[in-house]
Amino acid sequence: MKLFSFFKNVEKTGTDSTVGSEEIVEGVQSSTSTDEVETPLSLHPSWTIPQEQEYVFRFLSNELEPLKPNQISLSGIDIDVEPANGSWLVKAFFRSSLDQQISVGSVELLLLDEEGKTVASDEFDLKELGDIPPRSARPWVFVFTKENIFTEEPPAENWKLAFNVQSMVPHKLELEPTWEEGLTAEQKEALAKVVEGLPKLKPREVNISGFQVKTQDDGSIAASVFIRNGHSKQINIEKLPLELVDATGDLVARGSFELAPLSVKANTSKPWTFIYPKEMVQKEEPDFSRWTVRVPQ
C-alpha cells in the first residue's frame, strides 16, 4: 500500500468507534479481566517512515483513551482530500484490546459526521492491515473514492469511522408472514439454500434474482424472484417496473407492480411472486430454459 504522508503537525479531528471483538473477529478468546487496556503503537511491518513521523504516531496513540477488555476500535485521526481524483484519505488507528493476535477480513466501514449521518461508505479488506498484535493500535489510511462519498466536503470535526457490523452477518432469507405461514419447513430450507448459493452482493447493492417461472392456465405468467438487499438498512419498495425476458433474449412480458410497500430488511433476500396478466404478455411461447427479470432502463 502507498503510505500517504502524515504531516508533522497533525490535529486529531476524529472520535472513537468501538464494538465487541466477537462482532468483528471469529473464534476469539474473551478475557475475563475488567482492567482497562492500553494500546501502544504498532506499525505495519512493510512501513518504513521517518523517525519524526513515527514520533507523531506514537504521540497520537499515547493520547488515546484505554479500551475495555475484548474490544475492537477505530479511532479517527484526520481526513485529507486527494486533489487529483477527489478521494478522501481517512486516517485512523485500528485498535485491539485482545490478548491474542488477530486478522480481520472484509467489512463495510461507514464515515459518520458529527450528527451521525453517513457521509461515505465502502467495503475494505482489513487483511491489508496485516496481523494485529495483542493490545495494540495500528495506524492506517482508508481511501474512500468519489463514487462512495455522499457529500461535497469531508466533516471538519467530531466525525467517526465505524464498522458496519451488519455487513459481516451472513446474508440470509427473509419471509413475509404470508410466506412464513404458507410454506413447509422443507420449502423454507430449500429457499434458504438457494439464497446461500447466490453471488455475494456488493455494499449497498440491490438486485433481483429469479428462481421460478410458470405459465398459468388463464394465460398469465407467475415469476417468483428474490429481492436482494445489500444495504446496511431496510429498504421499502412501493412501485417496481419489471420486464420478463426468456432464453432467446426476447421480451416476454412487461409490467409495473404496485407494492404496499414491500420492505426488505438489511442484508437479506426476500422472495416475492409477480403475476403478469395475459394482457401484459407479449410472447406466446417463451423459452424458459433460462430467463431473467430486469428493471427497464
Image (cartoon, rainbow, N blue to C red):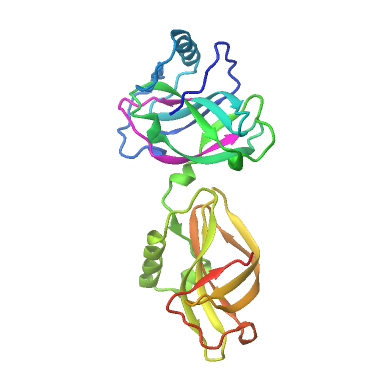
Q: Quadrant of residue 98?
A: top left
Q: Quadrant of residue 150?
A: top right
Q: Quadrant of residue 120?
A: top right
Task: Name the residue at the front extreme.
Answer: 84
Quick check: 252 above or below 122?
below
Give the magenta range. Answer: 93-112
Residue 195 painted magenta = no
On the image, the x and y values in percent for residue 244 come to 56, 75
Quick check: 142 above or below 197?
above
Quick check: 253 above or below 241?
below
297 or 270, nearer to the observer? 297
5 or 106, nearer to the observer? 5
On the image, the x and y values in percent for residue 36 come to 41, 19
Q: Is residue 153 toward the left or the right of residue 120 in the image? A: right
- For the point 48% across and 74% down, the residue is 291
- For the point 42% across and 57% down, the residue is 199
Q: How many marks?
A: 0
On the image, the x and y values in percent for residue 174 come to 48, 61
- For the point 37% across and 70% down, the residue is 185
Quarter of the image where the N terminus is located: top left
On the image, the x and y values in percent for residue 175 come to 49, 65
Quarter of the image where the C terminus is located: bottom right
Task: Name the residue at the right extreme.
Answer: 152
Task: Name the residue at the bottom extreme.
Answer: 217
Residue 105 painted magenta = yes
- For the point 64% across and 72% down, the residue is 257
127 or 32, nearer to the observer? 127
